[in-house]
Amino acid sequence: MRLWRFRRWSSLLFGLAIIWLVCGAGYFLYLGASKPSSVLTDDNNADEAKLDSDIVKSKRNELHLQQEIGHQGDVDGDHAVHAAVVRKHAELVVPPEGDKSEEVGNQDYSSVVLDPRRKQEGYDGYGFNDALSEAIPLQRAVPDFRHNLCKRQKFPLADLPTASVIVIFHNEAWTVLLRTVYSVLNPHRSPPHLLKEIILVDDFSEKEHLKEKLDTYVRENLPKVMVLRNPRRQGLIRSRLNGAAKATGDVLVFLDSHCEATLGWLTPLVGRIHDSRSAVVTPVIDVIDMDTFKYQGSVSSIMVGTFSWDLVFRWVAIPDAEKKRRKSFIDELRSPTMAGGLFAIDRKYFYEIGSYDEEMEVWGGENLEMSFRIWQCGGTLEIMPCSHVGHIFRKRSPYTFPGGVDRVVTKNTVRMAEVWMDDYKELYYKRRPDARGRDVGDLTQRKELRNRLNCKPFQWFIDNVFPELYIPGKRSIAWGIVRNPQSDLCLTSNGGLSDNAAIILGKCNTAEISQSFDLTLKKELRYDEYCVDASQRSPNSPAVFFPCHGLHGNQEWEVRDDGTIFHASTDQCLDRGTASFGGKVVMNTCDSRAPSQQWNVQPVSKKA
């Protein structure tokens, strides 16, 4: 009996050992097979994976390894000067002994006590919590939001093109500007032999800390960095042209002055341009919170750029066709448009396709103009999922806008529409009738550029780059104003659209930008990328704007023969209620006899 039990347990243990060996071998083979077939070599990633531990070791050895950096700040108080020393890696920047400008991964600054007056001054002067920025180290570790496949991606570093990073600033805060620079200089972020230079272009700043103090700091502490100064205020577009003219790298990388480059951000950008010189590429743009300076990102929630018909840039979900085209998460992601603040482009190709429209002023519209031009003239515009850069998004711009925002931005967008959009420019003028006929300067050179490059029509852009693009009046039941006859008031968007924004009533005007609604064949009541949405069944519950999702439900409406607009999901009707001019539209139980529920929708020709 004992011998039998011994044999039984021996057989069981032997079987488990065989299973363990087979599973282990299978897992090993799986790891090898899961690597992309196009993998090349990149010794730098091994250093990146050990970043935090390297920092700890460097602290222990009093070699304060410089860490990642972020965005703008202001300097009213004294700040320690950060020395630049070459150690171990070429151009490794190291702060002086005793400097408190580096930290390891800590992003909880809730314990920092700020003077209320100084805090408000920061918001007033820079549009973000500059007082907190001053209390945060210039060099900090931030989360790595890259997909695991990105960390196994390899590149032939010896063959990749070099990069000139161009940063434009105007009255920027000290700490944020320096974090931007330090994050790019960090050898774990930017392989030293790929980073040719950083060109800081000062667009005629007035802040004292951005004059001689900055020149001295750069000269004494920051290798590979130069400061270029405009003799007068010229704006973002012309400042970038000034910086590009001084650049000597193979690739131009444009960044805003309130960014943080992260682990491995540069190599995927120049690597893609190495493979295709007509590819214009952008990193994934993560968010640095303007109040807390927390770095916020995601591995998977990447969106692509598009635009509304008043020619304002917008983010949207990745189209289904693009999801099907890509074979791997780390494949380049084609984007119809780009935000314009952060991108990389082959330096020679930048000029071949017309750089920027030099008659545009300051900034605004140049990103869409370049996006359309890239696609229509044979290039591609792509987001690289393995490159992440953080950016401070402010709620308002704290800077002056020479010439006035409306005049400048309208001039720029009209120039873009007239050169690149063909007959589709009429949809812009429908949204912006005040823009038609404005003096926007001579367009001859830009139209000649389009002809010389044999660029495709805008219809090609819609058909091939973004067939999902919403086009007002196309595939529509009705398009125009939605009017309540009794009050002569119309549905109106309340300024800038946002999630759950109220729909208000305004005096009807067929030329009013904010009153052009589209009743689509999907039965959406739509204004650009936002749809009228209702979710509550209670009396006088709100009707609001919400991003169109195409799934019917809360966004499905029926214009009935009795004049009511019926919402099946809540079994209610759109109602003016007791609201007068400026009041909010609500939902109520349907009553075709109620004048407040009668609506006229201006029809258009029905096109499929």
Image (tube, grey):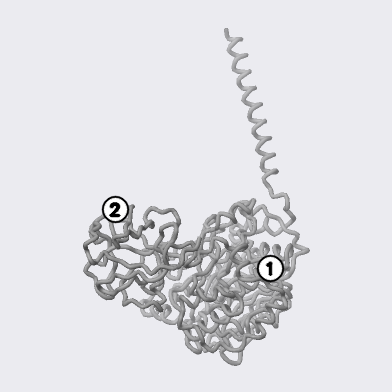
Q: Are marks 2 and 1 in contact (CB under 8 Å)?
A: no
The residue to which callout 2 is attached is: 571
The residue to which callout 1 is attached is: 379
Q: Quadrant of residue 235?
A: bottom right
- In percent of width and height, residue 586 lies at 28, 64
Q: Residue at x 73, y 70 (%)?
A: 162
Q: Quadrant of residue 102?
A: bottom right
Residue type at mark 1 is Gly
- In percent of width and height, residue 389 lies at 57, 66
On the rendered image, what quadrant is the N terminus found in?
top right
Q: Is residue 86 placed above or below 230 in the rendered structure?
A: above
Q: Is residue 104 visible?
A: no
Q: Is residue 212 placed above or below 6 in the rendered structure?
A: below
Task: Name the side, left or right, on which 162 lies relative to 494.
Answer: right
Q: Is residue 578 placed above or below 229 in the rendered structure?
A: above
Foreground residue, 166 or 567?
567
Q: Quadrant of residue 132?
A: bottom left
Circle 1: element type? loop
Residue type at mark 2 is Asp
